[in-house]
Amino acid sequence: MLKNSFFSIILKEQEENKENRGSVEFQVVSFTNKIRKLTSHLELHKKDYLSQRGLRKILGKRQRLLAYLSKKNRARYKELIGQLDIRERKTR
């Protein structure tokens, strides 16, 4: 449960600055929160296929945003990956 409180702290910091709600970092953090909530939901409800579809869509959106951020600003990308404790995307 330590991770949930950590993410809520990050969200509160970014929510205070309402101008940043459209920033890539804020969107990635909010998608990560949604992903974690859906994952815990799916652990209980294994046959909830609509939630599985929603999870896959959110994962794709987050992946595209992270790809964009890694192309535009590699330092911010590395920092965000470290804060959220998610894997770096695979490169071909």
Image (cartoon, helix red, strand yellow):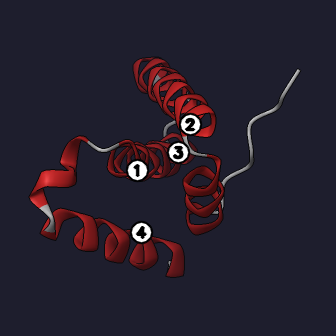
Q: Which residue is mark 3?
A: 39
Q: Which residue is mark 1?
A: 25
Q: Residue at x 53, y 24 (%)?
A: 64
- Disc 4 element: helix
Q: Are marks 3 and 1 in contact (CB under 8 Å)?
A: no
Q: Are marks 1 and 2 in contact (CB under 8 Å)?
A: no
Residue 29 in the image: x percent, y percent?
A: 41, 53
Q: Residue at x 14, y 70 (%)?
A: 16
Q: Which residue is mark 2?
A: 66
Q: Residue at x 12, y 53 (%)?
A: 19
Looking at this view, name the residue that lies furthest to the right: 92
Q: Tell me which numbered mark, 4 or 1, is placed earlier along the sequence.
A: 4
- Disc 2 element: helix
Q: Which residue is mark 4?
A: 7
Q: Residues within 10 Å of mark 1 (few under 14, many from 20)?
A: some
Image quarter in which the C terminus is found: top right
**Nearer to us in this view, 30 or 76:** 76
Circle 2 or circle 3, nearest the eye: 2
**Nearer to us in this view, 36 or 76:** 76
Q: Amino acid at mark 1?
A: Glu
- Quarter of the rendering containing residue 82: bottom right
Q: Amino acid at mark 3?
A: Thr
Distance from disc 4 to disc 2, alpha carbons, whole Å, reads 17 Å
Distance from disc 1 to disc 2, alpha carbons, whole Å, reads 9 Å
Q: Amino acid at mark 2?
A: Leu
Q: Is residue 53 left or right of residue 79?
A: left
Circle 4 or circle 2, nearest the eye: 2
Q: Amino acid at mark 4?
A: Phe
